[in-house]
Amino acid sequence: MIHALRTGAVIGILGGGQLGRMLSVAASRLGFRCHIYEPGANPPAGQVADAVTTATYEDAQALADFADAVDVITYEFENIPTTALDLLEGRKPIRPGREALRISQDRLTEKDFLTSLGLQTAPYAAVDDAATLAVALAEIGTPSILKTRRLGYDGKGQARLQSAKDAAAALDTMQGAPAILEGFVDFSHEVSVIAARAADGTVSAYDPGENVHQGGILRTTTVPARLSTAQRTDAVLLAGRILNALDYVGVMGVELFVTPQGLIVNEIAPRVHNSGHWTQNGCTVDQFEQHIRAVAGWPLGDGGRYADVRMENLIGDDMDRVPDLAGKADCALHLYGKAEIKAGRKMGHVNHILRTGRDQIS
Amino acid sequence: MIHALRTGAVIGILGGGQLGRMLSVAASRLGFRCHIYEPGANPPAGQVADAVTTATYEDAQALADFADAVDVITYEFENIPTTALDLLEGRKPIRPGREALRISQDRLTEKDFLTSLGLQTAPYAAVDDAATLAVALAEIGTPSILKTRRLGYDGKGQARLQSAKDAAAALDTMQGAPAILEGFVDFSHEVSVIAARAADGTVSAYDPGENVHQGGILRTTTVPARLSTAQRTDAVLLAGRILNALDYVGVMGVELFVTPQGLIVNEIAPRVHNSGHWTQNGCTVDQFEQHIRAVAGWPLGDGGRYADVRMENLIGDDMDRVPDLAGKADCALHLYGKAEIKAGRKMGHVNHILRTGRDQIS
């Protein structure tokens, strides 16, 4: 059992992007201070954090000082170098724990883990070279998609194969990195479950949201998702099985494909997740506070949903729409304070409140 | 017309307490950075602000540097020395403006202003010495209450008079400061209206909340307040009249006594207000973001209420209840990160969600 942190305690966050920023804000509501560790200068999270360390994940002294300055360590992204984790873990607890990171850092390990729990994934096979790719293609066929096992996000490090002729070009894209070939799943839509597990083993899942991607980047998440009651229950139970198997502490995002053959796990993220941003305007306790509560050893909060919400990411030039969105009713803006607008860069999001109980209340 | 600030702009906040803290968090949602100016060390707002200046209001250089570093200046309390305001205003706009500060810094000026607008206040008279107190007592009678004209808050600088015999002792309490004698108002309950006015003159008021005080300190605010439809309309119109008369930009708290003779204005506060904290869990855009929107020259946001809420202040040893409150459903904690618990000190608040549209939604 983890001792609950008291008000004034310091939560260390690896990564200073928008997730770290919103975690820091949520932590402040519970009286905690946050210390951000981020290699890049002027991280968005630093604008609302009590302290910032600007250093690389190879800087042993900076890592040690950071660990000594905080009470617990969490993270906003999963691709943290193992050497840094080893050093940090020797000094302070890391939550969610190392096993969740080990599994989610590697697409092959992750799929093996999920199938070991009896969950469905896309057909997959390990690919290290042309020979193993040929074997994998024979088994999985085309269309399929070749992905690096590690360090992929937002559609990067991926190559589609329409036919076996694309094999050589796809393999080149991997630049020699260990890869995984995944078969396509014939799904009607994608949903994700944002679930939390407290240090005492309590699990709480938010209502699943329905995701729409464009160009490999999440565009919108809408709650409620199109799911039958049975599918909704399946989704939540499945997330709980993953969390319990990992003895997980914190919030996890679980992406699921909805198919006639049931729910197929696309991927898991051992952290707060873009598809859970709707909770900021749909629940009393949002995913960020839920994560902080878990890593601080607190009980989970009330994650019941009180509104229908469509979360829309503001990417690149979408920022031009902010003056218009600012004046709209039923519209909650969340901007990340990033100085420079770039194509494909997540600059903020907006929660469109589609329906609340307001008519009932007023 | 005020030019709207763009994302990345810096909002300067005078005062680093819990109101500054929650303003800073709200500003971050709109992509703004906050710079706190506060004489005391380690202010709660500094834990979630981009920059902090620790200096007195007599430090001309620090004030000038602060003004130069920000795009607009606002404040979390009204008793800022005039000399500091003069210096700051020469460099950057202050919102809400000086007139609102001038009026709310002095109880007598405030009452004169309110009556000039045709609004009802408690009977009052200026008191400078024993002679004027005798005149005031003859006019207003007892029970009544003698208050310093300036720098009073949370029941401080006040003395009750049960009869004329208490006059000398009450006057001693004022320590020679200019004072005001106020007659008691026979009211059934107190409500407050939190209203906002944008730079373009748009006014938006939150649903009034009903306040309960203990020992001169706000204990709870509950929405909806017990008010007839006519009283509710009166309350909002009255707040709008005050804001328009001041050409006000920002959020104001207006405390009202509910009496058979109508609504009587108790006092106004030219800032976000403790009785508006319920908006954090009852509205899409809370009072803190509404204030930031106004001072940034943005349109006001959606302040419609979607839940019934009881805000309860956590004062001093109430912090012992946090572990219990953390585990309760329909309970949203907001702690201020203050290191030391003191009797009478506001340490946080909790919004109890009494009713939402959840049953309708689920």
Image (cartoon, coloured by chain):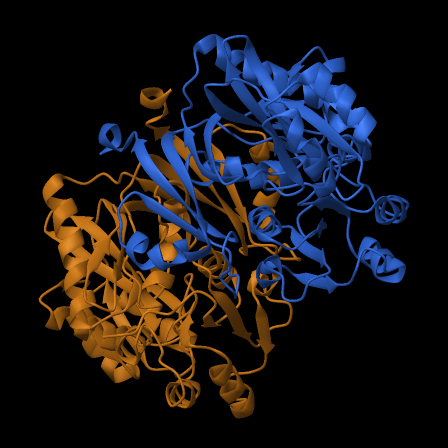
Chain colours: A blue, B orange
Q: Is residue A218 visible?
A: yes
Q: Nearer the viewer, residue A69 or A62?
A: A62
**Residue A64 as seen in the image, left or right of residue A20:** right
In the rendered image of this protein, does residue B212 appear above or below residue B131? above
Image coordinates of residue B334 in percent, x first then y, are: 52, 46
Image coordinates of residue A174 in percent, x first then y, are: 73, 40
**Residue B24 as seen in the image, left or right of residue A292:** left
Q: Locate the C terminus of chain B by quadrant.
A: top left
Q: Nearer the viewer, residue B282 or B295?
A: B295
In the rendered image of this protein, does residue A237 appear above or below residue B9? above
Q: Residue furthest front?
A: A165
Residue visible at 49% across and 62% down? A341
Residue visible at 44% across and 16% down? A227
**Residue B18 as seen in the image, left or right of residue A100:** left
Location of residue B170 (image quadrant) = bottom left
Location of residue B30 (image quadrant) = bottom left
Image coordinates of residue B24 in percent, x first then y, are: 49, 61
Location of residue B74 (image quadrant) = bottom left
Image coordinates of residue A155 in percent, x first then y, are: 60, 40
Q: Nearer the viewer, residue B182 or A182?
A: A182
Q: Is residue A286 visible?
A: no
* Numbered-mark total: 0
